[in-house]
Amino acid sequence: MPNHVHVVCTPLLAEDGTYHTLASILQSIKGFSAIRANRVLGRKGTFWQHESYDHVVRDEAELHRIVEYVLSNPVKASLVKQWQDWQWSFYRAAV
């Protein structure tokens, strides 16, 4: 989307045997992408807003509903006709 990002992910195990926290995952994604985006745009400073919305997925049906929502977002915004045409969409089913 031009003004926001959706991510559906499963936290991975850290070296200490615990799962990476959502806060650490978001910090990593936002930090890396902000540096790259600012470089491309020739800017410096804050790139992302401090807010975020997170939701714990509790079952398979909810996961499918959320993934469908995320993939169809650019279609609903009339940016493309089907989600596969949105060049920034990526989907890989959990293994």
Image (cartoon, rainbow, N blue to C red):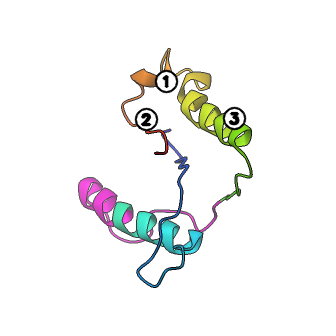
* N-terminal-most mark, 3 or 1: 3
Using the rendered view, name the quadrant where residue 73 is placed: top right
Mark 1, secondary structure of its residue: helix
Work out whether mark 2 precedes mark 1 in sequence or the reverse, and give the earlier one: 1
Tell me the mark number nearer the camera, choosing from 3 and 2: 3
Quadrant of the rendered structure where residue 92 is?
Answer: top left
How much space separates mark 3 and mark 1, taking CA atoms? 15 Å
Percent position of residue 43, x then y: 31, 63
Task: State the residue position of label 2.
Answer: 89
Q: Residues within 10 Å of mark 3 (few under 14, many from 20)?
A: few
At which x and y percent is residue 61? 72, 37
Q: Amino acid at mark 1?
A: Trp
Asked if the residue under mark 2 is in contact with the one under mark 3, i.e. CB atoms within 8 Å, the reply is no
Q: Which residues are magenta?
A: 34-52
- Where is residue 64, by image quadrant? top right
Residue hosting label 1: 83
Residue 83: x and y, percent? Answer: 49, 24
